[in-house]
Image (cartoon, rainbow, N blue to C red):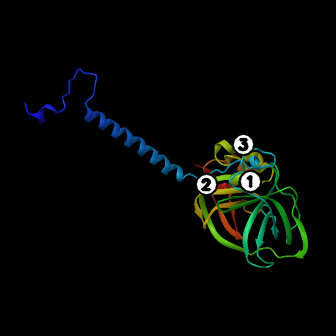
């Protein structure tokens, strides 16, 4: 027998030991599978929308980090509109183009009650932001200045049908975690009963926006019928209009359906 033949691997079927080549093969396959699943998990996770952290984690005295969407107390001047919910339209100069339109809510699970409209107002509170949603959480209603102002321009964008989820406009941007889905259904229902703005988060952008402020066919708040559709996949249909920088979805209750 030659020297090369004597060094060839020899496998004994009844032995409890695996040949070295098979051991290396199993280790290589195992490492590849672990790395592949880790990469797959990272890829899938990177596409998941960040639910933000709890707003209340950032309140004074809390020994935890502030929420991702919480941008701190800020003050804004702008024009206030009340239908379907109070919205503050902010421009760089009085009478100028509206640059951002902000939802308003009070502290806790309640909306903002005010009769100030068609005036420039000043509002101060904690700003929440998620995607293209700005929500200003105020303790006091906006204070009107002595300067009257006209309402922002309204632009009709046509009749639309879209799939998405009805949420409240305070918890979804980061007021609670999670701020959407069935886990948040009860919380969202209480917020909407308290007149926190109702929003529609779309599965696909509608007229360039990923969320729209909800209204009934008459432009007022949609009413209690939306309770059956909160935090569930739903198809809505109605007219869309742009007021300032805010899209308003005037939905037809008769054409709403669960998916």
Q: Position of residue 187 (x, y in %)?
A: 73, 44
Which mark, residue 164? 2
Q: Residue drawn at (28%, 22%), measured in percent from left and top?
A: 16
Which dot marks residue 57? none
Instruction: Please say if the residues under marks 3 and 2 sit with CB atoms less than 8 Å apart.
Output: no
Few, some or many C-alpha atoms within 10 Å of disc 1 (few <14, some 14-19, many ≥20)?
Answer: many
Q: Residue furthest left?
A: 1
Q: Separation of disc 3 and disc 1 at Cα?
A: 14 Å
Q: Which percent across, then down, holds residue 247?
A: 68, 66
Q: Which residue is mark 3?
A: 186
Q: Earlier in the sequence, mark 3 or mark 2?
A: 2
> At numbered mark 2, what does the secondary structure look like: helix, strand or loop?
strand
Q: Examine the rendered structure and indicate whether residue 17 appears above or below residue 55.
A: above
- Crowding around mark 3 (Cα neighbors within 10 Å: few <14, some 14 to 19, many 20+) is few
Q: If the image is split into quadrants, where does the N terminus sit?
A: top left
Observer-side mark, 1 or 2, equals 1
For disc 1, the marked residue is 170
Q: Which quadrant holds residue 218?
A: bottom right
- Left or right of 9 on screen, residue 131: right
Judging from the image, what secondary structure is the residue with disc 1 in? loop
Residue 135's x, y, as percent? 74, 59
Percent position (x, y) of residue 53? Answer: 68, 48
In space, the residues marked 3 and 2 are separated at their CA atoms by: 18 Å
Furthest residue toward top: 14
Residue 91 vs 238, above or below: the answer is below
Q: What element does badge 3 sit on?
A: helix
Q: Residue furthest right?
A: 146
Horizontal side of 70 relative to 205 (left or right) equals right
Q: Nearer the viewer, residue 71 or 150?
A: 71
Q: Residue at coordinates 49% horizontally, 49% vertically from top-left?
A: 42
Q: CA distance from mark 1 to mark 2?
A: 17 Å
Circle nearer the N terminus (1, 2): 2
């Amino acid at each position: 027998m030659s020297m090369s033949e004597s060094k060839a691997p020899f496998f004994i079927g009844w032995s409890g030991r695996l040949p070295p080549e098979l051991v290396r093969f199993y280790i290589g396959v195992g490492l590849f599978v672990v790395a592949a699943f880790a990469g797959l998990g990272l890829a899938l996770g990177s596409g998941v929308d960040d639910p933000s952290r709890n707003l209340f984690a950032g309140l004074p005295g809390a020994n935890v980090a502030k929420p991702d969407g919480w941008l701190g107390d800020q003050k804004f001047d702008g024009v206030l509109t009340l239908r379907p919910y109070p919205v503050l339209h902010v421009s760089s100069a009085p009478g100028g183009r509206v640059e951002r339109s902000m939802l308003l809510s009070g502290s806790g699970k309640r909306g903002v009650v005010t009769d100030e409209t068609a005036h420039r107002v000043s509002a101060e509170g904690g700003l929440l932001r998620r995607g293209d949603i700005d929500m200003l959480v105020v303790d006091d209603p906006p204070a009107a200045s002595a300067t009257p102002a006209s309402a922002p321009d309204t632009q009709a964008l046509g009749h639309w049908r879209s799939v998405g989820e009805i949420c409240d406009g305070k918890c979804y941007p980061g007021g609670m975690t999670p701020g959407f889905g069935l886990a948040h259904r009860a919380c969202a229902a209480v917020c909407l009963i308290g007149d926190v703005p109702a929003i529609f988060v779309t599965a696909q952008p509608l007229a360039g926006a990923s969320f729209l402020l909800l209204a009934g066919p008459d432009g007022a708040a949609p009413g209690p019928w939306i309770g059956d559709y909160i935090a569930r996949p739903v198809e809505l249909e109605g007219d869309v209009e742009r007021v300032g920088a805010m899209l308003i979805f005037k939905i037809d209750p008769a054409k709403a359906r669960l998916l």
